[in-house]
Amino acid sequence: MDDDVMLTRLPVDVRGVIGHVDWARLSDPEARRLRELGVDEGVEVELVHAGRWGGGPIACRVGRMTIAIRRRVADAVTVHRIG
């Protein structure tokens, strides 16, 4: 079973490690913001809220911070499930 999923498809309360960020899909300000928030390959993340109808931002935990990310931006992040 392939455990690599887009961040938006990671089940809520399941931890993962960021395997890849498709920086080319993001604008420079979006990429800079993600890096400033600690989103990068090898970092552990956990999806904590994903909205009911698939619209709006998601909330995920990166380290000890909980951050909100637009779904379009989160779709550029691939995560390997670890729990």
Image (cartoon, rainbow, N blue to C red):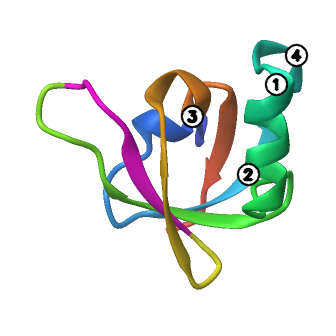
Point 42% across, 63% down: residue? 14
Q: Quadrant of residue 74?
A: top right
Q: Nearer the viewer, mark 4 or mark 2?
A: 4
Q: Which residue is mark 3?
A: 74
Q: Nearer the viewer, mark 3 or mark 2?
A: 3
Q: Which residue is mark 1?
A: 22
Q: Which residue is mark 4?
A: 24
Residue 36 placement, left or right of 53: right
Q: Nearer the viewer, mark 1 or mark 2?
A: 1
Which of disc 3 and disc 1 is earlier in sequence? 1
Which mark, by number, is residue 18?
Answer: 2
Q: Are marks 1 and 2 in contact (CB under 8 Å)?
A: no
Q: Is residue 55 magenta?
A: yes
- Circle 1: element type: loop
Q: Which residues are magenta?
A: 54-61
Label 1 CA crowd tier, 10 Å (few <14, some 14–19, many 20+): few
Q: How far apart in space, not on screen, are marks 4 and 2 (Cα)?
A: 16 Å
Please state which amino acid type lies under the numbered disc 2. Ile
Q: Quadrant of residue 81?
A: bottom right
In this orientation, does residue 1 appear? Answer: no
Q: How far apart in space, not on screen, are marks 1 and 3 (Cα)?
A: 10 Å
The image shows residue 32 at horizontal and vertical percentages of: 85, 42
Direction front: furthest residue: 29
**Viewport quadrant of the N terminus:** top right
The image shows residue 3 at horizontal and vertical percentages of: 59, 42
Q: How far apart in space, not on screen, are marks 1 and 2 (Cα)?
A: 11 Å
Please state which amino acid type lies under the numbered disc 4. Ala
Please state which amino acid type lies under the numbered disc 1. Asp
Please state which amino acid type lies under the numbered disc 3. Ala
Point 60% across, 35% down: residue? 2
- Circle 2: element type: strand
Q: Are marks 1 and 4 in contact (CB under 8 Å)?
A: yes
